[in-house]
Image: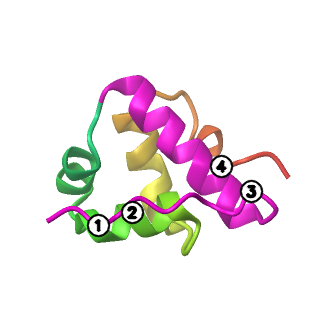
Amino acid sequence: MTPKRKEPDLSTYAGRCGARLRMLREKKGITVEQLAARLGVSYRTVYRWESGDHDPPFNLLPKIANILGLHSPREVLAEQ
């Protein structure tokens, strides 16, 4: 069962990171479940990142960037 999608609070850095991650994932055509499976985390964890409840751990940023076809892990993060 997929949790209800919560919109991130864009006034926070975590919210902006979550919105960016969702946009990049959707642009690549990858579902939350697919991204979670490739990262070895639960789909709920990815939902929490995308909703701005939590940031993805730094050690996963290179893998996220690779899956999303980005050149650098920094591209996953939102601008300050």
Looking at the image, which residue is at 25% across and 56% down?
A: 36
Specify start and end residues of the magenta stretch as a single range: 1-29
Depth check, mark 4 against mark 3: the one in front is: 3
Q: Are marks 1 and 2 in contact (CB under 8 Å)?
A: yes
Q: Are marks 1 and 4 in contact (CB under 8 Å)?
A: no
The stretch drawn in magenta includes residue 51: no
Q: CA distance from mark 1 to mark 4?
A: 24 Å
Q: Amino acid at mark 1?
A: Pro
Of marks 3 and 1, which one's residue comes earlier in the chain? 1
Q: Check disc 3: other Cα within 10 Å, few if <14, some if 14-19, many if 20+.
A: some
Of marks 1 and 2, which one's residue comes earlier in the chain? 1
User: At numbered mark 4, what does the secondary structure look like: helix, strand or loop?
Assistant: loop
Q: Amino acid at mark 4?
A: Leu
Q: Check disc 2: other Cα within 10 Å, few if <14, some if 14-19, many if 20+.
A: many
Residue that numbered label 1 is attached to: 3
Is 47 above or below relative to 73? Answer: below
Residue that numbered label 2 is attached to: 47
Of marks 4 and 2, which one's residue comes earlier in the chain? 2
Looking at the image, which residue is at 80% across and 45% down?
A: 79
- Quadrant in the picture for residue 8: bottom right
Residue that numbered label 3 is attached to: 10
